[in-house]
Image: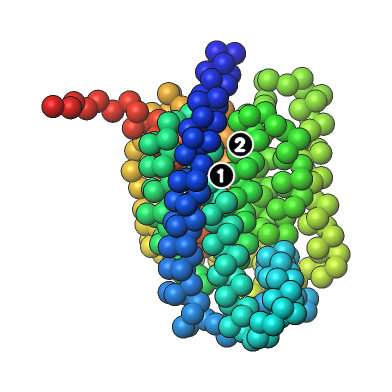
């Protein structure tokens, strides 16, 4: 109860500094989103992979892509809709127009995600520390772009996770159902909001209500997942075969024999690892509980993904930032 009271007071303070600096914060978020988006565009899209991006887009909108791209169709269809409008208004119907649309989509979504991150961090921290957390996010962004060229659903997924964390912390449980339902066709990992919510609520809700809510949230994930697989079938993976349980040993061997994956994992959070272990006991209880998704997340990607792809860790970063900024507030320093 005391923690909830402190949290409500902090939220009121946050509302003050968000509103009082709204224009400046929007400019900051848009500027940083332009920097990170253009970096991604210039290094991974504009020269080496323009044709590949166009082919991926065409395959997805035609329903001919491999898994998991075909199941993550939402950003491709959004881009297709924007291109249709742009061409009808006189824009050339070329791959360059499509590439520009994806760049601007990334800028817009990341701008919103960065501002939402400030709102999330502002639940506990003042303006300076919240902005510091945002700057840390931008500083490690190159690692989030490491070893891949284009997954347009990742910025959306990042945004949905932050919104989900806010919903859990502020007890807006009814936000989670549409977030998860809408988030599935962007990236299926949105399902991890469910164990984060469950860990936060266990012991605080009657068992019957907890089970009912859990079933409802699982349905929010299963329904769109089932619809997508009913439409397109169980597709082969882009690595030339369908990933099954039998493939787990080979994927696990791939990750365990490539130390660069563990290096990227360590560097992406770097000093935040120390902050997490040093300040664990002082973290807000709801954040400690939501950290249950970190080992789940890492195990899943250890046996089913590629640890070297730093973009996979983007949804976890907001939780680590709370740990880091909370730890920073406990450091002793002197001013002369």
Q: Residue at x 46, y 83 (%)?
A: 47
Looking at the picture, the colour scheme in use is rainbow
Q: Which residue is mark 1?
A: 116
Q: Give the number of marks.
A: 2
Find numbered disc 2 in the image and state the secondary structure of the residue it sits on. Answer: helix
Q: Which residue is mark 2?
A: 166
Q: Earlier in the sequence, mark 1 or mark 2?
A: 1
The answer to which quarter of the image holds residue 91 is: bottom right
- Marks 1 and 2, Cα distance to the nearest angstrom? 9 Å
In this view of the protein, can residue 308 be seen by the observer?
A: no
Image spot of residue 336 (x, y percent): 13, 27
Is residue 284 toward the left or the right of residue 84 in the image? left
The reply to whether callout 1 and callout 2 are in contact (CB within 8 Å) is yes
For disc 1, the neighbor class at 10 Å (few under 14, some 14 to 19, many from 20) is some
Q: Residue furthest left?
A: 336
Figure check: 224 above or below 23: below
Of labels 1 and 2, the one closer to you? 1
Instruction: Name the element at disc 1.
Output: helix
Picture quarter containing residue 146?
Answer: bottom left
Q: Residue at x 54, y 62 (%)?
A: 107
Q: Quadrant of the N terminus?
A: top right
Judge from the rendering whether residue 305 lies leftward or rightward of residue 264; answer left or right. right
Q: Give percent across and percent down for residue 261.
A: 42, 60
Residue drawn at 57 percent across, 67 percent down:
104
Q: Is residue 152 above or below residue 116?
A: below
The one nearer the camera, 140 or 87, is 87
Residue 238 spot, x, y in % from top left: 64, 75
- Pick the residue in front: 160 or 297: 160
């Amino acid at each position: 109860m005391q923690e909830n009271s402190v949290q409500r007071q902090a939220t009121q303070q946050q509302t003050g500094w968000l509103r009082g600096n709204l224009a400046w914060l929007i400019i900051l978020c848009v500027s940083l989103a332009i920097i990170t988006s253009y970096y991604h565009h210039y290094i991974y899209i504009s020269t080496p992979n323009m044709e590949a991006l166009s082919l991926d887009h065409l395959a997805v909108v035609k329903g001919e892509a491999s898994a998991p791209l075909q199941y993550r169709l939402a950003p491709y269809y959004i881009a297709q809709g924007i291109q249709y409008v742009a061409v009808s208004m006189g824009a050339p119907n070329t791959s360059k127009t499509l590439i520009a649309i994806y760049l601007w989509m990334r800028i817009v979504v990341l701008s919103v995600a960065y501002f939402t991150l400030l709102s999330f961090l502002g639940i506990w921290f003042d303006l300076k520390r919240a902005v510091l957390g945002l700057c840390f996010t931008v500083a490690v962004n190159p690692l989030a772009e490491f070893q891949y060229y284009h997954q347009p659903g990742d910025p959306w997924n990042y945004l949905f996770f932050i919104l989900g964390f806010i919903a859990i912390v502020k007890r807006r449980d009814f936000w989670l159902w549409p977030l998860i339902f809408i988030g599935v066709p962007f990236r299926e990992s949105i399902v991890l909001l469910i164990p984060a919510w469950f860990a936060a609520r266990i012991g605080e809700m009657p068992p019957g209500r907890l089970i009912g809510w859990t079933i409802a949230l699982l349905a929010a994930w299963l329904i769109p997942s089932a619809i997508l697989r009913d439409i397109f079938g169980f597709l082969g993976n882009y690595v030339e075969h369908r990933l099954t349980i039998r493939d787990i040993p080979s994927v696990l061997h791939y990750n365990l024999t490539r130390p660069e994956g563990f290096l990227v994992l360590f560097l992406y959070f770097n000093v935040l690892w120390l902050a997490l272990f040093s300040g664990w006991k002082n973290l807000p209880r709801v954040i400690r509980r939501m950290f249950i998704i970190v080992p789940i997340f890492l195990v899943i990607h250890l046996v089913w993904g590629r640890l070297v792809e730093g973009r996979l860790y983007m949804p976890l970063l907001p939780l680590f930032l709370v740990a880091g900024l909370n730890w920073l507030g406990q450091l002793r320093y002197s001013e002369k």
